[in-house]
Image: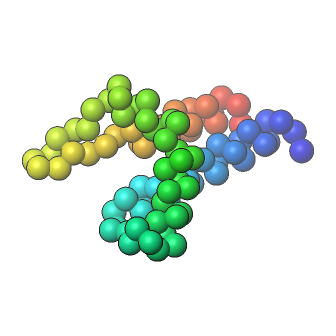
Amino acid sequence: MSVTYLICFALNVYVFLIFARILLSWFPLDPDGTMAAVAGFLFVVTDPVLGPLRRVLPPVRLGGIGLDLSPMIAILGIVIVQGLIC
């Protein structure tokens, strides 16, 4: 296995984790449930990337809803990096 392959694999896994976090954010979770533990793990893993993006890019207002664009920007950045090295 080459280092490039490992980096590309890790980036693919990270994109999957971001998608999982997006999906879990659509559903209410029981704080004592198993899915809350999964969501906590996803927050810990993805917050180092999404947190700074959220501070720079405020949510887009759509009526009474705020649309968080940071996951889309993070995935776009990862896809660009993958296009350069994979």
Outermost left residue: 63
Report the quarter where the N terminus lies.
top right
Q: Position of residue 86 (x, y in %)?
A: 71, 37
Dividing the picture into quarters, in which one does residue 4 lie? top right
Task: Residue 73: tell me if it is visible.
Answer: no
Outermost right residue: 1
Q: Nearer the viewer, residue 47 or 53?
A: 47
Q: Nearer the viewer, residue 55 or 2?
A: 55
Task: Residue 46: tell me if it is visible.
Answer: yes
Residue drawn at x 74%, y 39% is 7
33 sits to left or right of 54: right
Residue drawn at x 27%, y 32% is 58
79 sits to left or right of 50: right
Outermost top residue: 56
Q: Position of residue 29 (x, y in %)?
A: 38, 69
Dividing the picture into quarters, in which one does residue 3 lie? top right
20 sits to left or right of 68: right
